[in-house]
Amino acid sequence: MVVEPKVKGFLCITSHPKGCTKNVENQIEYVKQKGAMKNGCKTALIIGASTGYGLASRICAAFGCNADTIGVFFERPADPERGRTASAGWYNTVAFTKKAEEAGLYAANINGDAFSDEIKQKTIEAIKNSPSGKVDLIVYSLASPRRTDPKTGETYKSVLKAVGEPARNKSLDTDKGQIVEVTVPVATEKEISDTIKVMGGEDWELWIKALDEAGVIAEGCTSLAYTYIGPKLTYPIYREGTIGQAKKDLEKAAERIDATLKIHRGKAFISANKALVTQASSAIPVVPLYISILYKVMKEKGIHEGCIEQIERLFSTQLYNDNCLNYQDDGLVHIDDLEMRQDVQDGVFGLWDKIETSNLKELTDFEGYQKEFLKLFGFGLEGVDYQEDVEI
Ligand code: NAD
């Protein structure tokens, strides 16, 4: 069938199999061109491996380090009878696996709820079946709206709300291309603790415990997770909001996981990454407008990066190639350094107050934002014939 984008709010409910394939191939090509990394990982487990930062991590492990990979994700297969495409992460994974296998690499895929005990056990089996039988890199890159606690069966939902007082700011209605004023309401104590339960560090620790008990953690193993800090302008909705509280919990978990991995002469850390268009970030109020302005400023300065450029830089300049992690005063590793550069932030804030619907196209890179958003679902890639009938 001919597959077209069907955007509903911050979701696109269709994905293009050939476009997603092309998107993955472009990322693989980028990493290969950057060259092989010295002393890279040998077997990597990526939890949240099918899109965004997790997919980029898997590609860097496989094609930068020549590593076997085990990917965990939650994706939907196609339903050809009802004309429903698979989710983008599904097609991404098919494309990744084909390329990895062609390169002679082991690539195991576990599709299911990463928060469950069952998926953890299936993953352990896949690690045991891998050539080395152990993992020396564990990337925790989940972004999920809900989590069912495996011990109690209770389901928690994360919310994107403010803490203490409501957050008022400009935002971008990405459907209508209009600037709107939003008031993000204050979360209740339960909403805060539920968001921490979903996006905090508890599940990451459960993963490490399960892997450790199964004896599949290799000597010198590194584990990392991703956070976002950003500028003060987005603090009320991000860093100081419910999601930020969960991220602070994740950061505390990193310290405990670091202690566990030290026993294996390994380490755990958190990398603060750049704000980018992904399926997860498009759902956050204020952030799409901030990203649209940030992209304009960073592209003008020639320093714009996407997920693959960010993770390749993290891997090649800090994690591997005999380099050291560059911890900052806050205890985190930062690859958001270009985003947070003073001249970049001055550029963003110089524009922020001036933006209105009438000058949105001129003063921001909303066009680039929209293109990136569609690219997440395999649309708008060069070299793909979108009029062609494709097998879904
Ligand atoms: P994403 O939506 O692109 O990817 C999320 C991944 O998690 C997908 O592979 C998805 O299949 C998987 N997943 C979700 N729920 C799952 C479940 N229950 N079981 C198994 N897999 C599940 O998100 P992203 O933006 O790449 O975010 C990844 C991490 O990076 C998050 O921790 C996020 O906070 C962080 N981060 C994102 C940004 C940004 O701007 N996008 C910036 C800094 C840090």
Image (cartoon, rainbow, N blue to C red):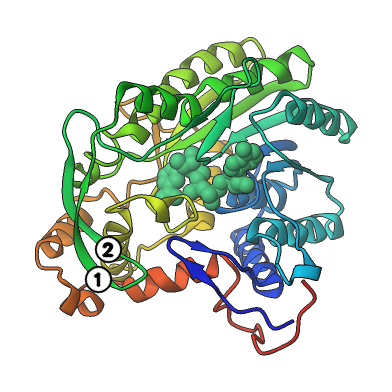
**Residue 115 image offset from top left, x and y in percent:** 64, 29
**Residue 276 image offset from top left, x and y in percent:** 41, 55
Q: Residue at x 42, y 30 (%)?
A: 195
Under mark 1, the amino acid is Gln
Of the 4 image quadrants, the one containing the C terminus is bottom right
- Disc marking residue 172: 2
Q: Classify mark 2: helix, strand or loop.
A: strand
Q: Residue at x 66, y 25 (%)?
A: 221
Quadrant hosting residue 263? top right
Spatial CA distance of label 2 from label 1 is 6 Å
| Apparent side of residue 195 relative to residue 73 in the rendered image (left or right) | left
Q: Give the class, few, some or many, for how many residues have Cα within 10 Å of label 1's Cα (few <14, many ≥20).
A: some
Earlier-in-chain disc, 2 versus 1: 2
Quadrant hosting residue 17? bottom right
Under mark 2, the amino acid is Leu
Residue that lies at the very extreme toward the front in this rendered image = 82
Q: Classify mark 1: helix, strand or loop.
A: strand
Residue nearest the viewer, comparing 128 with 355: 355
Residue nearest the viewer, comparing 40 with 115: 115
Q: Residue at x 26, y 42 (%)?
A: 237
In the displayed structure, would residue 212 be above or below residue 356? Answer: above
Residue beneath disc 1 = 178
